[in-house]
Amino acid sequence: MFEPYLKSFFVRSSDPTHIKALKLEVLTNLATDTNISVILREFQTYIGSSDKEFVAATIQAIGRCASNIREVTDTCLSGLVSLLSNRDESVVGESVVVIRKLLQSETVGHKDIISHMARLMDNIKIPMARASILWLLGEYCDKVPKIAPDVLRKMAKTFISEDDIVKLQILTLATKLYLTNPKQTRLLCQYVYNLAKYDTNYDIRDRARLTRALVFPSQGHEDNKLAKHAKKIFLATKPPPVQQSSFKDRDQFQLSTLSHLINARATGYQDLPPFPEEAPDPTVRYVELPASFTPENHHKPSHPKKSKPQKMKSFYSDESSPEDESEDDASDSSSDSDSDSDSSDSDSSESSSDEDNESDSEEEEEEEPRFKRKVSGGSSKKRPEKHGVSQSSGSEDTDSSSSSSSSGSESSSDEEAENSEDSDEDVKKKKKSDREQRNSVPQGRGNRSNLDLLLDLDDTPPAMDTPLLTPSLGGLLTPSPSSQPSQPLPPGASIQPASAKFVPTVTQELLNRISGGGLAVACRFTRSPHLYSPRMTSVELSFTNNGSEEIRDISVGSKKLAPGMALHEFAGIAVLSPDTTLNGTIGVDFNDTTQPAMFDLVVGGRTFSINITAPIGELLMPLAMNEGDFNLNQIKLRGMNEQCGVVSLSSGNKDIKSLVNRVYETANLLQVQCSSNDIVKFGGQTASGKALVLVSLSLPQDEQESTISVNCEKMVISSMLLKEIKSALKRD
Amino acid sequence: MIHSLFIINSSGDVFMEKHWKSVIPRSICDYFFDAQRKANNNEDIPPVITTPHHYLISVLRSNLFFIAVCMTEVSLLAPHPSPCLSVSATLPTGQLSNVPWRRSGVKYTNNEAYFDVTEEVDAIIDKSGATVAAEIQGYIDCCIKLTGMPDLTLTFINPRLFDDVSFHPCVRLKRWESERVLSFVPPDGNSRLLSYHIGSQSVVAIPVYIRHNISFRDVGGGRLDITVGPKQTMGRSVEGVVLEVPMPKCVLNCTLTISQGKYTFDPVSKVLRWDLGRIDPTKLPNMRGNVQFTVTQLALSGLKVNRLDIYGEKYKPFKGVKYITKAGRFQVRT
C-alpha cells in the first residue's frame, strides 16, 4: 500500500531518533526484490550518520533485509564485511553481530569472511562482537582448522581480563576445538578450564565444571554415556536465528492506542471484540427504521426525513422540559449509534432517492442544509403531541416499559405497534417481548462496541460533561440503567478519586454592585480539586466591574474563619477595567461544616466583608468504586451513621436518569456501577476529613416513593445531605 | 483522560500546571527530566514515557514542553464528543446568503483578484549531488476583493500535474473531476483556495546545486568547501539563499573565507549558517546541510494558471497571479 511513497519514508537528518527508528522499520517492511537496491543505497548513507543509536539500528535493518530477500544476501554480506573496516568501533561491533546471524542461516563458503573476522579479533573491543566472532570460529572450526586454535591461544592469554559473555564463548570455543582437534588443543583447553574454575562469576564456574565433566570425564567414569556423545551435544546443527524487528509484537494492540505505542497493556485498554462466530441477526440493523421495511406502513416515503429531524431536534430545542430532553437524548443517542445501519439501509432501499439528491444542481445542494433545518423546525413543533401519545401508552403498562430498555428500539417498536392499529394490549405485549428476545443476543454485542465509544466520551474533562450529555450515555448503554456510570473500573483500582460528573453553572451573588461601588462579586463551586491542598474546595470568584472607572488592586484582606477552617486566597487582580469580568479561584477548607467562610475583600483601599456558605453537596468529592466496595463500606457504616428517609418523587423524576441527574446537581458524588435495576448508588468522600459518604436510592417499581439512605461517619453531614437530596427529588 | 498538564520552559522549570482529577505532585516530571538528560537534544526525547503508575506524554512546541499525565488508555482513533455542544441556536449575522463562506452585499470600488502560487520543495540530495527524494508541497492562496456574488473559473495549462489536492469548500468538486477546472464562488478576502502535493512519481527539478567537500581530521580541524550555484531556473534569479550546516559536536569554531554574503556559527547548537542572498550566475559563491531559498516568478512544478473567467457579475476585475518557489525541508547529505 505504501510502496509508491517509499521515498517519503527516507530519513532526514533533522528527524528525532524515535522517528528515524520508525522510518527504518517501515522501509525494512516495504523492501521487496524490486526496490531493495534503492533501500540498501539509502541505508548505506545512513551508516555515515552521527547518531550512534540510529547507525546500529540501520545495520540491524540491513541484516533483516538480507535475510528476508534471498537475492541480496550476498551483496548485503559483502557490504557488512566492508563495514568491518569502518573506523567507528560501534559500527564494526554491530555489523559483526549481524554477520554472525546471517552466516548462521547460510553456512556455505564463508571461509574468508570468518578468517577476516578472526583477524579483527585483536582490534575489536566490544564484548558482544568479540563473543560473536568466537562463537563463529567455534561453530565453523572445521572450516578454518589453522586459525581457530591460534585464536584460542590468544584468548587464553587475555582470558582474565575479558567480559563475562566473552569468557563463556572462550569456553565454548575451547570445548568445540578439543572435540574436533584434540591433539593440538588439549593443553590449551585444560588451561582455559582451570582459569574458569576460579573465576569470580558463578555462571562461568558452573559452565566450566559441566563441560569439563563432559569432555574430560574423571577417572572411573570414562564410559559415561554423556561423554560419549559429547561431540553430538556440542556440535549439533542449530536452527538459524530469526531476525525479528523490535516492533514485532506490537500488533496485538489496537492501532493508535497508548498500549500500542508503549507495547504494554495500559490500564483501561480494551481489546477489539472478536469476530462473532455466527453472523449477527440482521434485524439489529432495523432498529431505527423498522417501519420502512414493513409493507403495511403508511409513512414509508416520509420516514427517512422523519428520523433525521429527530436526531437534530435536541440541538435546537433548548427550552423543553427536562423529561422531554432526556427522552430526546435517548432517541438521539440511539440514532447516533445506529447511524451506520441507518445509512446502509438507505443505501439499499432508498438509494434511488439518494441519487436524486446528488444529481441535483449545485445551487440546490447548497440550499439543502437550510432546507433540512426548516424541516427539523417543523417536526419539533409536531413532536409534543406525538410524545403525549407514547407517554400515555407508557403509563398504561408501566411494568413492561420500565423493565424494558429505554433505547430507541423500544420507542420505535412502540410506534410501529401503534401504527399497525393493533388494539389488543396482550398481543402488543407479546409482540414486544418476542422482539426483545430476538434482539437480546445481538444487542449485547452492540453494547460492547458502544462501550468502546463510551469510554472516551466519559473520559472527557468535566467541563464537557454537561447534564445534556449524561443522560444520553444512559440511553446508549441500555438495557439496565444502573450500568450507567461510565467505564468499568479496572480491578485493583477500586476506590479512586474521580472527576466531577456535573459542574454547576449557577452563581451565587456575594457582593452587590451597588454596595460594592460598581464591583459585583459572584461565586461558583467548580467541583475541581484545589491545587494548594486536597482538603480544600475550589470556589471560583468572578469579579465584574459594572462601574465606569477602573478598579485597582483586588485582594483578600483579613480572614474571620471558624477554628479548623482554612482559606487559600487567589492571586490578586491588579486592574479591572470597566465592563470586564475576571475570575479568581480561592480554596476553602470548610472542615466539613456548613459554617460560612468570612473574609474581607480589599478593593483599592476599601474593604468589603464577604461571606461564602457552601451547600453540603459541595463539600464532597466524588469517588469511583465498584459495587463490592460500596456494599462493604456501607455495612461498616450502619447504625448511628446511617440516615434513612422516604421521599415521594415529583412527576419529573420518575425515571432513573433524571433522578441521577438531580443527585449530581445536589451533591458532588459519582454513581457506582450496580447490578440491581431498582437501586442507584453513589460514592464520595468529604473534602476535608476524607470520610466516606455513601448514598443509595432504592426505587421500587410502580411506586411514587423512594427510600434514600445516606451513610457517613459524620452524622451531621449525612443528615444534612439526606435533607438536601430529599428536597431536590421533591422539586419539580 | 488527561489527569494533569504541566508546562515546562526551556530552563526546566514547571511554571504552569493544571489538574483535572486529582492533584499529581510535580515530582512526576522528574521522569521527564531523566529522559531529557539522556537524550542528545530536546527533539529526541521519547514522546511517551512510562512510569510505574502514570504515562507522560510530552510535546515540544516553541521551546516549551507540554507534559500530559495519563493513567489510562488513550486512543486517537476513537470518536470524540459530538460537536453538537458548540452549535448555537442563532445564526451568525451576515450569513444571509445561501453561500455560507461569503456574506451578501459585498462592495468594492476596485475589483481585484490575486492568486499566489507558492511551492515548497522538500528534497534530499545525496553526496554526489543526485536527488534522492524530491516532493513539492504547493498551495494557491487568493486575495479576492470582488463586488457581489461572482462565480469564478480558474483553468490551468497543465492540471494533470497534481497528485493530491485539497480544496477550499467553495470549489465545486464535480467540475474539477470532470473538466479539471476550478469553479467556485470565492470567499471574500484572503483564503487558501487549494493545496496540492506533487509526489515522487513526477520528476522535480531542483533549482540550486551544491558542491561540497568536507573533511575532518582528528586533530587540528578540517576543511570545508561548499559551492552553491543556480540550476534550471529559466532565467529567474534565486534569492534569499541560506545554508545551514549542522556540525558535529566536536567542532568548536569555524573560521571561513567566503566570497559572498556572511556567515555565523552558533557554538551552542553547532550550526553554521551562511546567508548568501542572491546568487549571481556569473560569479559563483564559494563555501552540507539544509538549504533555504526562494525563487520568485517560478513554480517549480511548471504549474501555470491559464485564465480566470468571471460569471454572474458585470464588471471586469483586475487579475494577478504570482509564482514563488521556496525550499521546504531541503537537505543535502555529506
Image (cartoon, rainbow, N blue to C red):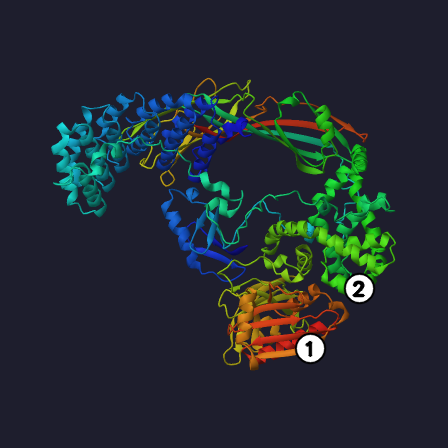
Q: Quadrant of the C terminus of chain A?
A: bottom right
C-alpha span from label 1 to label 2: 25 Å
Provide residue A106's location: percent of width, then percent of height: 34, 25
Provide residue A484's location: percent of width, then percent of height: 64, 60
Q: Is residue B105 left or right of residue B303?
A: right
The residue that label 1 is drawn on is A646
Q: Residue at x 72, y 37 (%)?
A: B187
Q: Residue at x 86, y 52 (%)?
A: A419
**Res. A515 image quadrant:** bottom right
Chain letter belonging to callout 1: A
With respect to residue A310, does B298 lie above or below? above
Local SS, label 2: loop
Label at residue B48: none
With respect to residue B130, does A704 lie above or below? below
Q: Which three-letter amino acid code belongs to the residue tagged 1?
A: Val
Provide residue A178's location: percent of width, then percent of height: 18, 31
The total number of labels drawn is 2
Disc 1, disc 2: CB below 8 Å? Answer: no
Q: Answer whether residue A385 is visible to the viewer in this image.
A: yes
Label 2 crowd (10 A; few <14 / some 14-19 / many >=20): few
The residue that label 2 is drawn on is A397
Q: Nearer the viewer, residue A710 or B97?
A: A710
Q: Residue at x 55, y 62 (%)?
A: A498
Q: Answer whether residue B304 is visible to the viewer in this image.
A: no
Provide residue A192's location: percent of width, then percent of height: 15, 37
Identify the mark nearer the N-term, 1 or 2: 2
Q: Nearer the viewer, residue A539 or B215?
A: A539
**Res. B275 image quadrant:** top left
Front position among marks 1 and 2: 2
- Asked if badge 1 and badge 2 are on a common chain, one would say yes
